Amino acid sequence: MRKMKRRKTREVSIGGVRIGGNAPVAIQSMAKTETRNTVSTIKEIKRLKKAGCEIVRVAVKNNADLYALGKLKKSIKMPLIADIHFDYNLALGAIDQGVDAIRLNPGNIYKKRDVGEIIKRAKKKRIPIRIGVNSGSLKNYRSRTSLNEGSPTSIGDLMVKSAIGYIKHFEDAGFHDIIVSLKSSNVLSTIYAYKKMAGLCDYPFHLGVTASGVKEDGIIKSAIGIGTLLSEGIGDTIRVSLTADPVLEVEAARSILQSLSLRNFGPEVISCPTCGRCQVDIEKVVKKLKSKLRDIRYTTYDIRNRPISIAVMGCEVNGPGEAREADIGVAAGRNSGALFKKGKIVKKVREEDFVKEILLSLRGAKRRSNL
C-alpha cells in the first residue's frame, strides 16, 4: 500500500506533543465537567488519557475556572489547552497559570489591542495558540443572515476569510506558533474551508466537525468530514465532537486514524454483517473479543508494519476467504468454526472458544514477532 502524502506544514509543540511537520496525527478531546470542579475534571481527564487521548482542552469561562488551571496542570500528565471566549483577560490569566496552549475564537475576541496582549504573553511563555474559527460564531456572517441560509462554499469562504484576517495580527507581531481550525456543523462547509485554507498557509490544522450530534450521528459526520480531509493529506490533530461521553470521542478518533493507516492502536478486527446463513452469534463473539483487546491493549504489527488483522466470519460464503487473508481468523459453521493462521487452517474450534483461541494465537504471534 502506498503511503498517503501529507500536506507539508511547520511544526508546533503543545506540551511536548508535536503537531504538524512529520509528527503523527494527534488525538484531542475536551473535558465536559465544570473546570472549577477540579476533582471531577481530573477524574475525567485521567479517563481520557487511559482511552488514548493525547491533548485535552478545558473551558475557561470565569475566574473560578481560571484559578483551577494551575491545580489541573499539576495533577494530570497530558498537555492542557485553555478554551477562551469573550474575555481576553482569561487568556492572559490562563497563560500565567501554566497551560500548554490557548484556543481563541476570532468571532468573540477580536479587538486588535486585546489580541496583541495575548500574543505578547504567549510569545513570552513560548506556548502556541490555536485560532479556532467556528461557523456559528462568525462575527460578520451572523449579523446579516442565518447559518442555514448560506451555501457550504459561502460559509467556508467566510471561515477562511476570518482565519486569514486573524492570522495577520499574529504574523505582524512575529508570532508563528499557530494551529488553525475551521469547524462547522455542516460537513461540506468544513471540508471546503480546510481544503481552501490548505493552499493559503503552512500552519498545522486541527480537524473537527463541530456540534456533530449524539454518538451515532456525530461519529458518521465526523468520520466523513475528518476522514475525507485526512485521506487527502490534510490534518495534523483531530477531535471528534460528540454529545456523549468524551471517551467515545477518543475511541472514534482512533478508529478514524487506524482505518486510514495513519496510526496503529492494535489489531484490526474484521467481521461479517451476518445473514440467514450464519449459525453462530457473531455479534456476541466480536463484542467479547474487542472488549478483551481493549483490556490487553495490544499494539501489534506484522512484518509489513501494519496492524495484525483478525477476521471473525459467520458462514462458508466469504468466511474462509476473509479468514485466510487475515493474520488470524475464524470461519464459523454450526456451533463451531475453523481457526486460520496466515491462510492455513490450524484446527476446529467450538463457538464458545472462539475468543480464547484467537487471543492465544495473537499472543503467539506477538512472541514470534518479538513485539
Image (cartoon, rainbow, N blue to C red):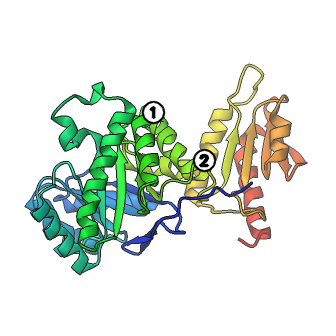
**Dot 1 lies on which element?**
helix
Q: Residues within 10 Å of mark 2 (few under 14, many from 20)?
A: some
Which residue is depicted at the point 44% across and 61% down? 50
324 sits to left or right of 133: right
> Which amino acid is tagged 1?
Glu
Residue topped by disc 2: 290
214 to the left or right of 111 = right
Circle 1 residue? 216
Quadrant containing the N terminus is bottom right
Q: Position of residue 251 (x, y in %)?
A: 49, 49
Residue kind at label 2, given as amino acid type = Lys
- The C terminus sits in image quarter: bottom right
Which residue is found at the position 44% from the left and 35% from the top?
Answer: 188
Establish if 192 lies above or below 129. Answer: above
Residue 345 location, x and y as percent?
Answer: 90, 47
Q: Quadrant of residue 35?
A: bottom left
Q: Secondary structure at mark 2?
A: helix
Residue 235 image position (x, y, % from top left) = 48, 55
**Is residue 192 in view from this perspective?**
yes
